[in-house]
Image (cartoon, helix red, strand yellow):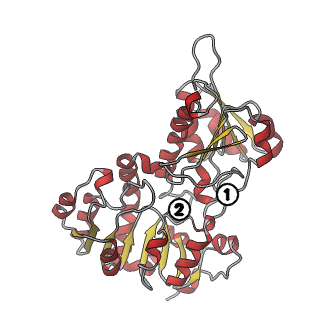
Amino acid sequence: MIIGTPKEIKNNENRVALTPAGAKELVKRGHQVFVQHTAGIGSGFSDEEYVSAGATILPTIEEVYAIADMIIKVKEPIEPEYKLIKEKQLLFTYFHFASYEPLTKAMVESKAVCLAYETVEKTDKSLPLLIPMSEVAGRMAIQKGANYLEKPLKGRGILLGGVPGVLPAKVLILGGGIVGTQAAWMAAGLGADVTIMDVSLARMRYLADVMPANVKTMMSNEYNIREMVKHSDLIVGAVLIPGAKAPHLITRDMLKIMKPGTVLVDVAVDQGGCIETCKPTTHENPTYIIDDVVHYCVANMPGAVPYTSTLALTNATLPYAIQLADKGWKKAAQQNNDLIPGLNVINGDIVYKAVAEAFNMDYVPVEKYLAD
């Protein structure tokens, strides 16, 4: 198979979807790998390293898309890329379709095969290609939140861990999954007073067992959220419904009861955000203020630490990329059920139900394409 890795063109996205080590593994199996010039430079990988691994460097993104049977990316294609995508071309990347209708319609019109990292799912319901970036984003949420609590950045002017004689900051985390758990560990390690809210009693029992004493658990419901936001200094939105738009757990009117300088970090922004006033921002302009509340809603948080993020991501994606390259997407999905829920759009049909429902578009069961 001919595999292409373009340079990411989303604002301040420095990750790359294929490392030289990954390129070498694919080349060893007889595949051709084409990498766009400087695609890996933001993550610390030079063109020369890719060439040494057996890949071919192409000067432009247009050439990479034109030659490849499978495109391996990190972030969803953005508008300048739509016209480059070919019918029946396999795109293996994060898509987060349910949060952005123009992308969904563009991929339907392209008649490409879109296999989304974020909905690849194991039999135990875990999301193996979302977990590594969720781990990074959860830890970063606290790192960034602590920074924006500083007064020069319009925060409350509070030190996350406090000092002897001064209480630490109160951190509220909405969602006890991978992001929420990593955020809680990070905040707890810095000495904050942490509360995790979730709807699963089983998950909260687990978290209560493994978390340090400065982390508490609380049932997530509207009443409890309203009470907690009044006293919280840093609030992290860490809610995920796989493949679907995130629910709004913090509504606009709740901002009025928060303390001025409260910081909101919405890690769910890729899926539409779990904070009603959330809108995607970039590393270039990461925050905005509404009702004296600081919003940090960067849609590609792990892109700020590309070396760590690229290695963490490609450790997870490469085994699947090899299967797709060796067998083609159809046979690979037939033989590995993890890949079936990853299929979102095939040849102009939406085959992932939550995406079709998000935009009231037609849904075609994926089995139509997997039948022999």
Q: Quadrant of residue 93?
A: bottom left
* Residue at x 73%, y 53% (from the top left corner): 248
Q: Which mark is residue 118?
A: 2
The residue where tag 1 is placed is 246
> Is residue 268 shown left or right of residue 15?
right
Q: Amino acid at mark 1?
A: Ala
* Residue at x 54%, y 46% (from the top left corner): 286
331 or 115: which is nearer to us?
Answer: 115
Task: Where is residue 169? Give x, y as percent.
Answer: 63, 26
Going by the picture, which residue comes out furthest to the right?
Answer: 223
| Above or below: residue 301 compared with residue 341 | above
Marks 1 and 2, the one that precedes in the sequence: 2
> Is residue 287 shown left or right of residue 80?
right
| Above or below: residue 205 compared with residue 239 | above
Q: Give SS at disc 2.
A: helix
| Above or below: residue 176 compared with residue 166 | below
